[in-house]
Image (cartoon, rainbow, N blue to C red):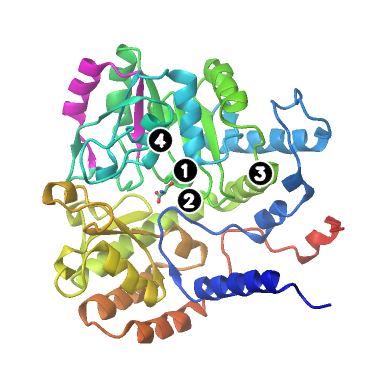
């Protein structure tokens, strides 16, 4: 039987997408690969179902088995994050943050968070940006929070503790938000959370980027350091399916979070991804520590190797990073190649995928988010592919040949493809069970 031409077209495009990524070096700091075991969950019958409400109290029938899955998922995650309460219903990191805003604040309440130009996430943003360097964000636009910015040391890439203490005491925000999208160093939670609590502020830590490093005990431990809640997406350094969760440090936050998650922020909560997350959590329990250690080693090694080749990775004095992310100042290529947009495009042509990013000081130099002065690089996905420190030197060589020696990107793309041919297997994951799909009947 002939395949429908539009169907064929989509399959061809999907195939081309797979071919490109299979032959590329994936360096986007917010992405990761799920294992075959996790992917399997995405094609089960759960992808057709609804389960509104909490476990055992659903307002949809047919969920007796899904209840067991969500219960197990929560147990595994509670164990990983050592926390008494977790809600697995937010469908993304943004929705997890909206759940916190809904549970612990009202429209026009104040929130303190780092600004987007210095690395804050779009979900921390005000309704309308206070400078022309970026657009507004979810906190203001959706939750109508009045966002003020946490004082930030632009060159040390971290929150300024002394100035933030003053700001918290003066503003008395309803929510203090930690976390970032350019998250190189642990945030000063233990210094600031007690000050926030003194003035009645709810403290949340957005761990989207560093969740795997926290669960693997290789970064700070926000809950032990004093945060009340933690939000995260489950697909960056934590290599699960694309979704979000809320973690609470105390059971007494549970009811507010549950109500905000449903009927507040979700109806259907993408049940197949809850199952996938349970499998990812079981995998992480087994391999997470070893994996997250290697993620950080690789990020530091890549920072060092790039730096030695004349590529301006920021914070060399602090060993570049303590996370999966490094930030590169590419303004020295402005005359030869261009800024973030052009460098990103050149890398993409050479099969190296890393995204443009504002440098914290771009705003002072009138550069904006469309064509910023930086490139952000993450080591979490290449680590999943089995790469180690010596491979970081090879990757740094590709950057050097492309950006400094100006070798043709098509030639580099060929070299990248050859290099990638040795890294086609997923590491830190359960073995693939080819027979596992047997129980999924497609009718
Ligand atoms: N915007 C994503 C990031 O790249 O950090 C997170 O949602």
Q: Earlier in the sequence, mark 2 or mark 3?
A: 2
- The reply to whether dot 2 and dot 3 touch (C-beta < 8 Å) is no
The residue identified by callout 1 is: 211
State how far apart marks 2 and 1 are (Cα): 8 Å
Q: Is residue 2 above or below residue 299?
A: below
Q: Is residue 257 above or below residue 96?
A: above
Q: Please provide the residue range marked out in magenta.
A: 158-179
The residue identified by callout 4 is: 138
State how far apart marks 2 and 3 are (Cα): 16 Å
- The residue nearer to you, when weighing 187 against 29, is 29
**Drawn side of residue 38 relative to residue 56, left or right:** left
Image quadrant occupied by the C terminus? bottom right
Secondary structure under the numbered disc 4 in the rendered image: helix
Q: Earlier in the sequence, mark 2 or mark 4?
A: 4
Q: Residues within 10 Å of mark 4 (few under 14, many from 20)?
A: many
- The residue nearer to you, when weighing 7 against 207, is 7
- The reply to whether dot 2 and dot 4 touch (C-beta < 8 Å) is no
Point out which mark residue 184 bears: none
Of the two numbered discs 2 and 1 in the rendering, the one whose residue sits closer to the viewer: 2
Q: Earlier in the sequence, mark 1 or mark 4?
A: 4
The residue identified by callout 3 is: 278
The residue identified by callout 2 is: 236
């Amino acid at each position: 039987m002939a395949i429908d031409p539009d169907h064929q077209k989509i399959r061809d495009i999907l195939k081309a997408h797979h071919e490109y990524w299979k032959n590329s070096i994936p360096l986007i700091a917010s992405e990761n690969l799920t294992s075959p075991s996790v992917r399997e969950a995405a094609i089960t019958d759960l992808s057709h179902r609804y389960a509104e409400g909490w476990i055992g109290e659903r307002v949809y029938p047919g969920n007796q088995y899904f209840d067991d899955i969500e219960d197990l998922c929560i147990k595994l995650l509670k164990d990983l994050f050592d926390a008494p309460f977790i809600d697995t219903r937010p469908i993304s990191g943004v929705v997890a943050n909206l759940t916190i805003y809904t549970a612990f604040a009202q429209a026009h309440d104040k929130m303190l968070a780092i600004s987007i130009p210095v690395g804050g996430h779009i979900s921390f943003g005000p309704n309308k940006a206070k400078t022309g360097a970026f657009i507004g964000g979810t906190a203001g636009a959706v939750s109508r929070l009045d966002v003020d910015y946490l004082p930030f040391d632009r060159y040390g890439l971290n929150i300024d503790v002394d100035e933030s203490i003053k700001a918290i005491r003066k503003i008395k925000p309803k929510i203090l938000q930690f976390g970032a999208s350019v998250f190189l160093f642990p945030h000063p939670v233990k210094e600031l959370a007690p000050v926030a609590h003194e003035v009645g502020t709810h403290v949340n830590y957005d761990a989207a980027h560093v969740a795997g490093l926290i669960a693997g005990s290789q970064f700070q431990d926000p809950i032990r350091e004093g945060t009340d809640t933690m939000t995260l997406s489950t697909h960056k350094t934590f290599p699960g399916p694309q979704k979000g969760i809320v973690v609470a440090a105390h059971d007494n936050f549970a009811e507010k979070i549950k109500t905000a998650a449903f009927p507040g922020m979700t109806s259907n909560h993408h049940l197949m991804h809850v199952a996938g997350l349970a499998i990812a959590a079981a995998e992480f329990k087994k391999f997470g520590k070893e994996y997250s250690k290697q993620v950080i080693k690789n990020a530091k090694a890549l920072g060092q190797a790039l730096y030695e080749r004349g590529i301006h990775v920021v914070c060399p004095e602090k060993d570049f990073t303590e996370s999966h992310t490094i930030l590169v100042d590419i303004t020295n290529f402005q005359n030869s190649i261009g800024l973030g947009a052009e460098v990103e495009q050149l890398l993409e042509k050479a099969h190296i995928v890393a995204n443009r990013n504002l440098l914290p000081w771009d705003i002072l130099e009138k550069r904006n988010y469309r064509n910023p002065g930086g490139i952000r690089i993450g080591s979490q996905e290449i680590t999943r592919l089995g790469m180690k420190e010596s491979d970081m030197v090879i990757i740094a060589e590709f950057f050097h040949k492309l950006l400094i020696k100006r070798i043709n990107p098509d030639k580099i793309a060929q070299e990248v493809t050859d290099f990638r041919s040795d890294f086609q297997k997923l590491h830190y994951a359960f073995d693939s069970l080819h027979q596992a799909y047997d129980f999924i009947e497609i009718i």
